[in-house]
Amino acid sequence: MKTPSYSFSAIMDRRSFIRVSALAGGGLIVGTYLRFGNSALAETTPATPANFAPNAFITIAPSGAVTLIAPNSEMGQGAKTALPMIIAEELDVAWEQVTITQGDLNPAYGRQFAVGSGSTPGNYLPLRRAGATARAMLIAAAAQTWSVPASECTTEKSVVLHAASNRRATYGELATKASTVTPPSDASLKDPKDFKLIGTRVPGVDNAKIVSGQPLFGLDVKLPGMVYATYTKCPVFGGKYLSANLAEVKAKPGVRDAFAIDDIKGLPSGVAVVADSTWAAFSATKALRVQWDEGTGVSQDSEMMAKQAEALAKAAKPAELAPGVKAIEATYHYPFLAHATLEPQNCTALFKGGVMEMWTPTQIPASGHNLVTNGLGITAPNVVVHVTRLGGGFGRRGSNEFSIEVAAIAKKLEGMPVKLTWTREHDFAHDNYRSNGWHYFSAGLDESGKVVALHDAFVKMQGGPGDMTAGGFPFNAIPGSRVQADKLPAGVPTGYWRAPGDNGNTWATQCFVDELAHAAGRDPLVFTLDLLAGISAPANSGGGRGGRGGGFDPAKMTAVLKLAAEKAGWSQKHPRGEGQGFAVTHTNNAYVAIVADVKVSPDGELAIKKLTAVVDAGTIINLSSAESQVQGAILDGISAAWFQRITIKRGAAAETNFDQYPMLRMNQSPPLVDVQFIKSIAPPTGLGEPGLPPAAPAVCNAIFAATGKRLRTLPFSGESLKWA
């Protein structure tokens, strides 16, 4: 991909500096280093001796310095540390010698999608091979230098050793020679039992910069001569621009320009305001008065959707029950949700010399790249995407509307860098929301308490992810079970929200399983284990994205559930007002069980005392990051279930900021979130999302155990939990 010569010098500021270093054995490297983005970036002059760069992910300098590329976006899940750890493990390099550089959009890096908890599973084998190939080439270089068989050489912490002759050479010393070695076609990978780095605790490579406030995120980008912009679209979904008070807005302090944009492919019509600062742009935007053609979207309404869902469900055929079978029916509903990332959507762009250069906090760099090439007619090599750190993603930054918005503005202002920032209200109003959903369950229990029928009339918004089938648990445990899915007419923009599908569907199904257990007069743990025992392994998977990447393995789900119950002390008795509940999930091919311990005061005040989670996610790369990912996902799931909803009124989101869309506070969080991992040498599964789906149902089931109140509508903050 073409990178213009000004790409790094254009973003120099006081944090930039010139480094001149002597190379071992001679030579000089002169680099312009920029302390921006995910790590130092450098332009270098040709140096002698040569660097060893066996593939796109690895560079070893004669000084011994090792640079590894993190190909996927970093948004707090630890990919920027974990992915290079995979390379470093097979390369057998000393971690303290490693510098990590965030990879910009580049086909050489392969899968750069930071979505679906797929960064680690998708890159695990390719990155292992990259490291192993480089290690084999270094060994070959040493063997040739010493005239010994390569099979007699070993490696350890960036050094090649030949025990028979007691010789050693650092990777830096071998770099020039190794660069002439033909790469092996199939380098041997380590046996997982020999891993030394993978599975340990490694601090995040950006931790020091985060706590010291150094620039890392898209909002931190600063270019010389930069201007600041907003882009206002119709609040009603699908509405179009007609006219606006542009002259009045242009007269506001600090405003450079205000203009309408229309007829660009992939970009809804709207109004751009360009100013000397973000504050000036935001202030002028508040004075903007636009006449919109609201279109048919104005008819969308949450109350109307609920009535439509009920009508569709009534038309569905419920579970057929034999005489003597006890009928159990329940309706569960979850609302639209916003992503509510802490860092609002933003992007910086510079159009110069026919090249559109962009600095983007994106989960899918290619998405924004494609929007710009298709919408503005710029050839692909002339759109350069630099990836910054993301202040939250959760699926929201997989779609890149902000890229085409700022690119359109930057093209009009050719030669002038433009930073576009969405206001918080705009962020809430133009999200791609988690779809709402309704589950109208009907089931039958025989005289022994066994489930003999299960039917789910499932309704959600058309077009968004989160479809439901009868292939996942508990449907795969009950012969003849059915899911009849219907969809509301499209009209509200929906998209991927953390653990798409499973985030709401697991809550509903796991709460209903608990409901069935209590209706049968059985312990929910024993009831669920019996269901799992009746499933053949491996079973066909389904139900949201739970089985993506492999079949459902009841033995793995049984193992995490049993261990979680044991760690949480499931068999203990509790006084009224206190209780335990659990839930399980198979999400992104990981298995998670969570047990919640709660206490509810007689007047209904909820306290989550403890959460115990057991996870089978295959090989764990970075234990510290893995724990934080699961803990974060759990708290995110509880926050959404307890407090959050987006309500649609007249075709627009009614909630516009955090005062109407609360987040879980520290005093509401459990004092202990205990996370345990099943030890495994299997390839890693997804991990950033699977902890979320079982969190809410575990808490809701525990609330029922404590109070006898069954929560079937989210968020449950509006429900009374009083039990005295």
Image (tube, rainbow, N blue to C red):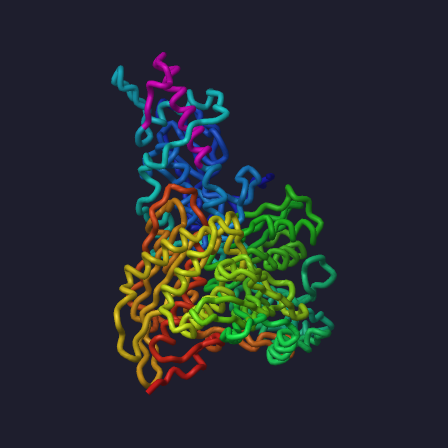
Query: For residue 427, what is the image quadrant?
Result: bottom right
Q: In the depicted view, which residue is nearer to us: 6 or 591?
A: 591
Residue 131 is inside the magenta segment: yes
Residue 341 is inside the magenta segment: no
Q: In the depicted view, which residue is nearer to us: 169 or 524?
A: 524
Is any part of residue 519 visible from this angle? yes
Q: In the depicted view, which residue is nearer to us: 217 or 462?
A: 462
In the rendered structure, which segment of residues is drawn in magenta? 128-155
Residue at image coords 58%, 74% = 653
Residue 603, placed above or below residue 27: below
Residue at image coords 56%, 68% = 455
Residue 461, placed above or below residue 39: below
Residue at image coords 33%, 70% = 580
Q: Position of residue 391 (x, y in %)?
A: 46, 59
In the current view of this chain or complex, which residue is farthest to the top?
147
Quadrant location of the N terminus?
top right
Q: Position of residue 250 (x, y in %)?
A: 64, 70
In the image, is 721 to the left or to the right of 377? left
Quadrant location of the C terminus?
bottom left
Q: Position of residue 672 (x, y in %)?
A: 29, 64
Q: In the depicted view, which residue is nearer to us: 45 or 577?
A: 577
Q: Position of residue 9 (x, y in %)?
A: 51, 44
Is any part of residue 429 visible from this angle? no
Magenta stretch, main secondary structure class? helix
